[in-house]
Amino acid sequence: MAENSIKIRAKLKDDVVTVKALMTHPMETGNRKDSKGETIPAHFIQEITCSAAGKEVINAQWSGGISKNPYISFKFKGGREGDDLTLTWMDNKGNSDSATVKVG
Amino acid sequence: MNTDLKRRMLLRGTIAGSAIGIAIGAGLLTPKAVLAAWPKEAFTAKDIPGALHSLMGADNAEESGEINIKAPDIAENGAVVPVTVSTTLPDVESIAIIAANNPVPLIANFNLLDGAEGFVSSRIKMGKSGDVIAVVKSGGKLYRTSKEVKVTIGGCGG
């Protein structure tokens, strides 16, 4: 996968870290057909994991029903400024990418 | 994280030819019981009870006023419908997002682990108008709420 497929931000406010991430991915369901009537093969992110300071805080399983170039946001407690926050995705073709930011 | 990912991929690769793989093929073990892999059955189920059953082990979700779905009343573009689910239920283990009228209703499942708040937000595709359903697993029980979204242009045909 292309580099920097993930844009991610993590902001600490009042004890809660809010994470927002955008990924670049076609998210093909496998139900669509191209202009020649041929099925476009399924190609979507299946799994997301996110960990803060080495501890997993959330993981998600997705279908092709998530929009193209997916967005995810979530919140967690117990994070500190400067903690490493890592988000990793893996798609149904075995591609994966990962990005790390510091909680700010 | 990276090594963990590699381990998972390795596990997945191995499964095909291993005894575990055979057991899965024979229906003796569900893949979910072997490793926390992508729940294929739940994501191919055409009906909501089927999806919930294979994802969460039960389908008797109780209506709850403590779950809030934020989504537009009318979505002009079904390919991108912003949905935010938040809940004040205690001990939230997971949140699933379902579009009732999609060919495959289950869209996403989020497992909330250490410290995660009862809040997830994403953008989903909707083939046509219908209910967006959020199912929250809290203290081992399922709770749900729904919100109707009218779609003017479907998102599944592109």
Image (spheres, helix red, strand yellow):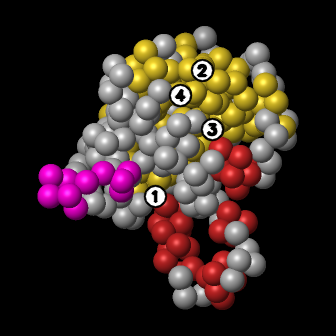
Q: Residue at (44%, 32%) from the top-left corner?
A: B128
Secondary structure at badge 1 equals helix
Q: Position of residue B48 (x, y in %)?
A: 65, 44
From the top left corner, tell me how far across and down residue B131 is, in percent.
Answer: 57, 27
Residue under label 4: B130
Mark 2 to mark 1: distance in Å?
38 Å
Q: Label 2 belongs to which residue?
A: B147
Q: Nearer the viewer, mark 1 or mark 3?
A: 3
Quarter containing the N terminus of chain A = bottom left
Residue B74 inside the magenta-drawn segment: no
Q: Residue at x 65, y 35 (%)?
A: B95
Going from the N terminus, do you reach mark 1 or mark 3 first?
Answer: 1
Determine crowd level at label 4: few under 14, some 14-19, many 20+ residues with C-alpha closer than 10 A. Answer: some
Q: Is residue B68 left or right of residue B57?
A: left
* Labels 2, 3: front one: 2
**Disc 1 target residue:** B2
Residue B75 visible (yes or no): yes
Query: Which element type, helix, strand or loop, lies under badge 2?
Result: strand
Q: Secondary structure at mark 4?
A: strand
- Quarter of image, res A99: top left
Of all chains, the one bearing label 3 is B
Residue corresponding to mark 3: B96
Figure check: B23 above or below B113: below
Q: Which residues are magenta?
A: A29-38
Mark-to-mark CA distance, 2 and 3 = 14 Å
Is B108 in front, or is A9? B108
| Three-letter residue code for mark 4 | Gly
Chief SS of the magenta region: loop
Q: Does the CB distance between marks 2 and 1 fall below 8 Å?
A: no
Q: Is residue B107 left or right of residue B158?
A: right
